[in-house]
Image: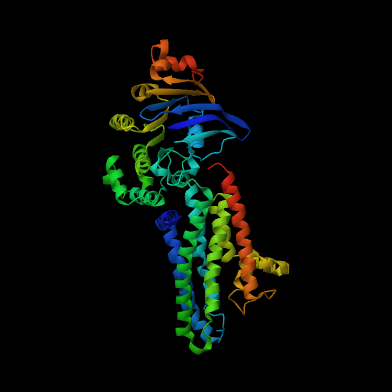
Amino acid sequence: MVSLVRAELRKLLGLPTARVGLLLGVLLSPVVVLINAPAARRADLAHSDTGLVELGVGLIGPMILGVVIMSSELTSTGDEAPRARQLTATLIAGPRRMRLLLAKATALILVVAVQASVATAATTGLTQVLHGDRVPVPAFARLAAAVLYWVLLALLAYSITLIVRNGIVPLTFLIVNSTFVSVSYLLTKVTDAAAYLPDIVGAQMFLRESDFPVRIAPVTAGLVMSAWIAAFLVVGALLFRRRDA
Amino acid sequence: MISVERVNKIKGRAQILYDVSFVAQPGRVTGFLGPNGAGKTSTLRVLLGLDRPKSGAALVCGHPYASLKRPLTTVGALLDGSGAHRARSARGHLRWVAASNGLPDSRVDEVLETVGLAGEARKRAGRFSLGMSRRLGLAAALLGDPEVLILDEPVNGLDPAGIRWMRDFLRDRAARGNTVLLSSHLMGELAEIADDVVVIDKGHIVTQGTLAEVVGGHGSLEDAFFALTAGGGPW
């Protein structure tokens, strides 16, 4: 199992797209804090979520990582053999499919946990430097919850890619949903039940002052989001085990 | 040793393999011959646990492929393409394959040397020619120094020197007691290299035996093949 995880780490970190995802995830949030700081100071808009809200924009990083760890297996390896995919080499090297999926998930969790920790430390640290006493230092539990949120969203991206067997559709949907038009957020305007959608509910693990239609305690929010991800992973794993490679 | 026992496979609504059974013995090169679409690749994919049969069993050294703990140390397999992501270098690809089976990185340079790709180790797989892709795929198959080789159309895309190299290489592996199973639709090539021949057509095994037995009174493997199969096309 350790060998499989090591192989998946090498595979993931060897992909140029994954490196882009890694960098974007680490850099975007601190940059947004930096850009927002003058306006926030002038209008006295800083509050206890400042520095943590900005972590949302960096989510593009774990999403890319979650998608490409699976989609890279499925893209054609060359024009001369359009049906050939890396997945063939992967399953020949590690034919036990559940162990393979577990190894992929473990590698993803490790990479995104490190990425999220660096991004969270950089973003909240920068917030303290720029805003000083106006923004209280977040409790360690809130920071850990933010890291967990990133990891869970990466796993969500991974499981959706596993189910739809395509990288472009989930990546487009997830990025659009988290940046330009949040379908999940718009749904919360229609029904309160949308507050329990995975990306919306998960944010309540660490955000306090944002506009949520239903207040959910952080631990409950974490459990609900984890249950979503577990369900997606189980469906993805069952399909992956049954399908021809 | 490889044994395929009464394998049936359905894809979509069509049955593509019917009670496919044969063995490939250690110390011999077994040629798996058939026209395009006859079921060669499908059989090999079932053998490697990539596709699931409706019924039957395919065993390598007495075990289903999927139950092998470090499969690359028992079986080396080469299917379509190189198996390497376009954006990865040859070395980068082989390094993860080696890691997956607990093999040392030193093996990567050894197999690159063996297949003649040492000078191309940093080149991205997406820029490889067909022949280089086959060599890279073969390099991955050799990483674990396996006792069984399963190769799908291994000479496809190789230049004459590459074909000759492959022939000598596989003969040498068989001489050392390895089991070599290779599929091909090139009869002349197979007649040069195979000890045993299994002929498949439209999902059915039509004959199997030593090369001499299969050729029988037909004069050549090609004549035997066309006599045993429908001819493989409208021409």
- Regarding residue A182, the answer to whether it shows in the image is no
Image position of A199 (left or right of B205): right
- Write down the quadrant of residue A145 in the picture: bottom right
Q: Nearer the viewer, residue A179 or B208?
A: B208
Q: Residue at x 64, y 71 (%)?
A: A221
- Write down the quadrant of residue A155 in the picture: bottom right
Q: Position of residue A197 (x, y in %)?
A: 66, 65
Image position of A211 (left or right of B67): right
- Seen as rendered, the residue at the extreme front is B62
Q: Residue at x 43, y 61 (%)?
A: A20
Question: Does residue B59 lie above or below A113 as drawn?
Answer: above
Q: Nearer the viewer, residue B175 or A221?
A: B175
Question: Does residue B219 lie above or below A136 as drawn?
Answer: above
Image position of A185 (left or right of B132): right
Q: Nearer the viewer, residue A1 or A239?
A: A1
- Regarding residue B110, the answer to whether it shows in the image is yes
- Seen as rendered, the residue at the extreme bottom is A133
Q: Position of residue B116 (x, y in %)?
A: 27, 40
Question: Does residue A196 lie above or below A122 as drawn?
Answer: above
Q: Nearer the viewer, residue A101 or A38?
A: A101
| Count of marks, rendered view | 0
- Seen as rendered, the residue at the extreme right is A191
Image position of A16 (left or right of A239): left
Q: Position of residue B63 (x, y in %)?
A: 48, 38
- Seen as rendered, the residue at the extreme top is B217
Q: Position of residue A111 (x, y in %)?
A: 45, 63
Q: Residue at x 39, y 11 (%)?
A: B219
Question: Does residue A191 lie above or below B151 as drawn?
Answer: below
Colour logic: rainbow
